[in-house]
Amino acid sequence: MWTITEDLLDDGKKVGISSSNYEDAKAASLCHRFRLLDDDGEICCEGLSDDCDSQRAFAPLDDFGRGYAGCTEIHYFDGQSWKKL
């Protein structure tokens, strides 16, 4: 489960897009910060996910990022730096 918290392509507005309905996303343990980048390395949006190291960790990129902004990468914050999956 994941949610987008900031859309950096739209003046940083919170967009409220998630993998499920808002109440489910709010109740879930979304504690892993991620960001989606386009093929120029520009950060398009940021969000939170319930997973950062399994195949499900790619869901924000697969479900939202590729079609919305042509994102090609997802990075997760490990507490000290951003790591590309």
Image (spheres, grey):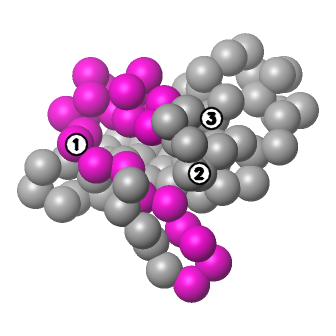
- Element at badge 3? strand
| Real-space Cα separation, disc 1 to disc 2, in angstroms | 17 Å
Q: Are marks 3 and 2 in contact (CB under 8 Å)?
A: no
Q: Which residue is mark 3?
A: 2
Residue that protrudes farthest toward the left in the picture: 40
Q: Residue at x 89, y 32 (%)?
A: 27
Q: Which mark is in front, 1 or 2?
A: 2
Quarter placement of the C terminus = bottom left
Q: Position of residue 24 (x, y in %)?
A: 82, 22
Return the disc, 1 or 2, that comes first in the chain's sequence.
Answer: 2
| Residue 3: quarter of image | top right
Q: Secondary structure at mark 1?
A: strand
Helix, strand or loop at disc 2? loop
Magenta stretch bounds: 58-80
Per the image, the residue denoted by label 1 is: 72
The N terminus, quarter of image: top right
Along the viewing direction, whichever of 45 and 34 lies nearer the viewer: 34
- Does the segment drawn in magenta span residue 74? yes
Is 77 positioned to the left or the right of 44 in the image?
right
| Residue 52 badge | 2
Regarding residue 12, the answer to whether it shows in the image is no
The amino acid type of the residue labelled 3 equals: Trp
The 10 Å Cα crowd at callout 1, few under 14, some 14 to 19, many 20 or more, is some
Which is more toward the observer, 79 or 41?
Answer: 79
| 79 part of magenta stretch | yes
